[in-house]
Image: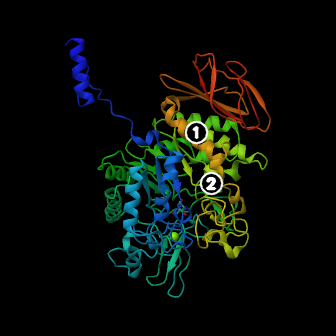
Amino acid sequence: MKATAVAAALTACVSISLCLQIAGQQPSTAKPDPWWRHAVIYEIYPQSFRDSDGDGVGDLKGITSRLDYLKDLGIDAIWITPIYPSPGVDNGYDIADYTAIDPKYGTMADFEVLVTEAKKRGIRILMDYVINHTSDQHPWFRESRSSRDNPKRDWYVWRDGKNETSTSPGQPPNNWQSWFGHSAWQWDETTRQYYYHYFYVQQPDLNWRNPEVHKAMDGVLDFWMQKGVAGFRIDAVSRLFEDPQMRDDPYLPGYNVYGDRNIKHLYTDDLPQVHVVLKEVRRVVDKYPGDPVLVTEADEPNIEALARMYGDGDEVQLPMDFQIADVNQLNAPKFRRLFNEVENNSAHGQPEYFFSNHDQPRQRDRYGDGRHNDQIARLMAVLELTTRGTPQMYYGEELGMRTTDPTRIEDVHDPIGRLGWPKEKGRDGERTPMQWDGASNAGFTTGTPWLKVPPSARQYNVEAEAKDKDSILNCYKHLLALRKSESALRDGDQVSINNDDSEVFAFVRKSSDETVVVALNMSAKARSIQLDLKTAGVRGSQLVPLYSAPKFTAEGSDRVTLAPFGALVARFE
Ligand code: NOJ
Ligand code: MG
């Protein structure tokens, strides 16, 4: 074809692949990256996000009403913690019906509107899949406990006690302990056996050795996939199986906050059968289009255990990295070692990073030094949002929200806070309402919020921070936008540099056409450092800041001075 004819054909062509064929090229067959590889996930604790009807409890309509805020912030998916009917002992992690909506959050119609409206804004929804246990009020368990020969008896884990007599239950079958204190076995008088519960007494464990449990739980996944969700965060997955020989767990020195002897959960955590179930979950969700994703909650003790969660690429795509979340101090060598480990994980899996969630004090309080907390909040934002993995945020972290524990035992909602008071105050402190504005209840509700809004909300809220260009909120927005605009931050490899530095954690992100350098001063002293860019194979002569806090001034091509807890993200040209 002559050039003019090609040009005419190109103007007229209707599809890219047809255009390429006319131009004499073959269309690329490379599969595009799945969406979650470049996504940022935002965790919503629905009870605390936004209340639409003034009952003091957040709800689905409340979330829908704030989708524009989330879109503007720049996140790609929301994970909503459980919104299913529940007696609420563990705030929804005790489920009484897996395929319905708890009326306190609204209706199934409200959920469908949320999915549709989120989709319009390019936001995907992940549901919480609570796989290990149900509520004791779930009809399955009510049946199971009704008689020893009920067809659902074996859906849960029932055992005889030790030394039981006709007048006494004897002792629990072994020494296994609940994560939430005391024995993991609960005596049930009706059928005179013990049932097993890794978490609260009201959360009996499902028996995953029973094929009917598999079938019923697979059906739950189908139900929500058909509603248009993009995947699941799987709860407490490492606790699914227990040792069939029922061996006692070994004791460790000391006592926990509930007064029990410390034990190692050797016979109830991470049994190999967990992976059989994860493969099955993956097969079920993979029947649906759109690259569904699985995220797991599993506080794996080391990189080998974490890497096993990926399977052979046929289990979980995003196992949450608890090792990094729980460093709990600004320690450059520790972060460097852990990031390097997961970057080079043997399964070549995508890392998933977070620093806060609904189970642990907020990052502001865990990483702040009490003097530079706002600056440290920005530093942590840079750490979370410039690394290669998929970041997961927790509502309000973008404002610098702090943990606000109850001050009196009478005010505690989370049962472990009553059991372990005052050493353990429970998890209410990290679940306080989202701070939307400076009004008395921070714009969360027109009623009385289920948890008090702290006084700091007057300063740290969306409305106030949106107006301040140096706010923590604007730091997050800036970084989230950079993850989209800079190919190196979106796609690039990650290589740590200045590996002997004990106070600055620095790394390079490098794509085919861009190099970005990130340097984080994790100390309270200003630090001047020579960035070791040549060793990382990086060429260039100029650092062009993309984000810096506080404002950064270049001193040459590779020497930088970082303020106390200073953070720099710069393109190297
Ligand atoms: C982990 C959840 O994140 C936590 O909130 C819950 O209490 C336990 N799993 C039990 O479901
Ligand atoms: Mg409400």
Residue drawn at x 66%, y 64% as measured from the top left: 261
Q: Is residue 539 above or below residue 103?
A: above
Disc 2 + disc 1, Cβ < 8 Å:
no
Q: Is mark 1 within 8 Å of ligand 1?
A: no
Q: Residues within 10 Å of mark 1 (few under 14, many from 20)?
A: many
Quick check: can you spot residue 555? yes
Q: What label sits on residue 463 in the rendered view?
A: 2
Of all residues, the one furthest to the top in this rendering is: 2
Q: What label sits on residue 283 in the rendered view?
A: none
Q: Is residue 250 above or below residue 516?
A: below
Q: CA–CA distance between discs 2 and 1?
A: 19 Å
Q: What label sits on residue 479 in the rendered view?
A: 1
- Mark 2 or 1: the one toward you: 2
Query: Secondary structure beneath disc 2?
Result: helix
Quick check: can you spot residue 23? no
Residue drawn at x 68%, y 23% as measured from the top left: 531
Q: Quadrant of residue 545?
A: top right
15 or 490: nearer the viewer: 15
Query: Secondary structure beneath disc 1?
Result: helix
Query: Which amino acid, by three-letter code, is at mark 1?
Result: Leu
Q: Residues within 10 Å of mark 2 (few under 14, many from 20)?
A: some
Query: Where residue 529 sits in the image (x, y, percent)?
Result: 73, 25
**Which quadrant of the rendered structure holds the C terminus?**
top right
Earlier in the chain: of badge 2 and badge 1, it is 2
Query: Which amino acid, by three-letter code, is at mark 2?
Result: Glu
**In the shown orientation, is residue 296 left or right of residue 113?**
right
**In the shown orientation, is residue 375 left or right of residue 93?**
right
Q: Is residue 316 above or below residue 204?
A: above
Query: Where residue 198 sits in the image (x, y, percent)?
Result: 52, 65
Query: Where residue 408 sits in the image (x, y, percent)?
Result: 73, 73
